[in-house]
Image: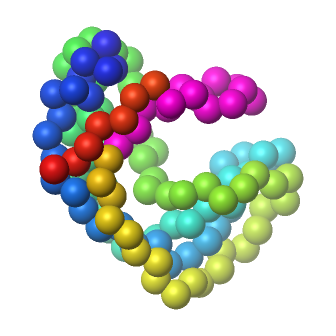
Amino acid sequence: MARTVADAIRKTSFAVMFNQAASFGAAPNYAFSLTTGADLLAANGLSTTLLDALRHAGLKVDGSSFQPHVTLFYDRRRREPLALPPLSWQVREFVLIESIDNRKYVILGTWPLA
């Protein structure tokens, strides 16, 4: 069902910018990730569109904590946030990834942004 929903999404490509690295999540497996304090309107808009469409299709989703980020590694230690020079790139697609416990991620599909 999620693939069918994704097939119907029509959004344009957009830029993202990350300017800090920080830990989040819970012990013992903190994600150390690129993040930003900026409001990434287009990324948040894509997330909202996807979540609304998935709910409308009858799927149960938890979108209460969407935080645009790029995970660099996992660590037992929680690290202090680091300011970074802005790092930007163009988002050209979104991806459906199966993530179950500690198994390897499985890419289930990719969809281009116009």
Q: Is residue 40 left or right of residue 9?
A: right
Estimate the x, y position of residue 14 in percent, counting from the top left: 24, 62
Q: Residue at x 29, y 37 (%)?
A: 111
**Applied colour scheme:** rainbow
Q: For the view shown, which residue lies furthest in the bottom direction?
A: 85
Q: Nearer the viewer, residue 99 or 114?
A: 114
Height in image: 61 above or below 76? above
Residue 51 shows in the view: yes
Residue bounds of the magenta highlight: 94-107
Q: Residue at x 50, y 58 (%)?
A: 69
Estimate the x, y position of residue 4 in percent, counting from the top left: 25, 18
Residue 55 image-quadrant placement: top left
Residue 105 is inside the magenta segment: yes
Residue 55 shows in the view: no
Q: Is residue 84 left or right of residue 80?
A: left
Q: Residue at x 46, y 72 (%)?
A: 18
Height in image: 60 above or below 92? above
Residue 109 is inside the magenta segment: no
